[in-house]
Image (spheres, grey):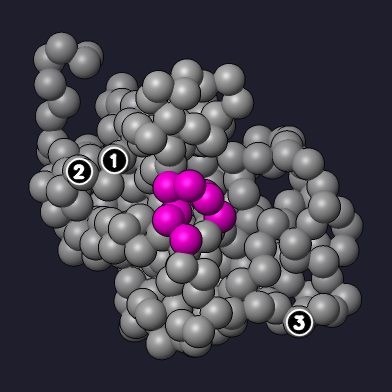
Amino acid sequence: MLRPLIGITGRRFRLSLLTGADERYGDRCVDSSMSDFASRIAEAGGLPVQLSYDTNATAVSQWLSGVVITGGQDVHPAWWGGDTAVVRDIDPRTDPMVHDKARDEYELGLARAALERGIPVLGVCRGMQVLNVALGGTLVPDLPPGPVRHLSAEAAPTDGTADHLVSFEKGSIAAGLFGDQATTNSWHHQAVDRCGTGLVVTGRASDGVIESVELPGAPVLGVQWHPEWMKSADPTMTWIVEAAAKLRADRGEEIPRSSR
């Protein structure tokens, strides 16, 4: 069985943010990604690997069989033509929730490199927005209050509440995974607005907010919820592993003998 190498993006912050960290190393930085991604990818048969900002996006995409662009802080509005006046001038390494242009630059480059090579891409929450921006799309900077609560107060993991029902387009990757509809969790205040070149909307919440996007004819899927934090098994995590393994097999790519 092929065990595809799946890259997972993350974030960088100062060690001083961790409770109990030794103060002598407080100004040193930590690269981190949510271990839930790694666990679910491994359970699905993949080999998860965390990607540092220092990993050259074009070079690493030659080794990877698939890429997961994960959730996190808002994409800086400078990348998609938004209002830069709202940006707080704070070092993102000292506050993980402010804009991080270094992370944006890395993930945008990685998304484009992965798309160029044709390997499977899964964008999760912020990652779906990164995928859209990488292709020239725009974002809704702040969703107005409405009948569907998108920025949930629930703690992870959770399968969400009944009001967050996503409907999928027939024939899409998402519909093939979930059927016509699925209830999902939700922790976002921004959303995809105008789709980037080639992307199509394949899932919406009942209030019309875009919840999934795809690139027809390519193994590319963006979801606005968090599959790694669904309490039940979410097929998107299995999808990227199986899509990556299939692509390797179709291309006749071998795996190093040491990993067989």
> How far is mark 3 from mark 1, CA to CA?
34 Å
Is any atom of residue 129 visible in this view? no
Q: Is mark 3 on a helix, strand or loop?
A: loop
Residue wearing tag 2: 55
- Position of the N terminus by quadrant: top left
Viewer can see residue 61: yes
Span colored in magenta: 90-97
Disc 3 residue type?
Pro
216 versus 82 height, above or below: above
C-alpha distance separating marks 1 and 2: 5 Å
Q: Where is residue 170 in the image (x, y as percent from the top left)?
A: 60, 70
Q: Which amino acid type is shown beneath numbered disc 2?
A: Thr
Q: Which residue is drawn at 79% across and 57% down?
A: 152
Give yes or no for contact between labels 3 and 1 (Cβ–Cβ under 8 Å).
no
Image check: 82 left or right of 27?
A: right
The local crowd at label 1, few if under 14, some if 14 to 19, many if 20 or more residues have their Cα within 10 Å, is: many
Mark toward the start of the polypeptide (3 vs 1): 1
Q: Nearer the viewer, residue 24 or 54?
A: 24
Secondary structure state at the residue bearing disc 2? loop
Q: Nearer the viewer, residue 47 or 106?
A: 106
Sequence-wise, which precedes: disc 2 or disc 3? Answer: 2
Does 120 appear in magenta? no
Residue topped by disc 1: 52
Numbered circle sitting on residue 144: 3
Q: What element carries label 1?
A: loop
Label 2 near label 1: C-beta < 8 Å? yes
Question: Quarter holding the C terminus?
Answer: top left
Three-letter amino acid code at the position of disc 1: Ser
- Say if the magenta span includes residue 92: yes
Q: Where is residue 17 in the image (x, y as percent from the top left)?
A: 53, 35
Residue 28 versus residue 123 in the image, above or below: above
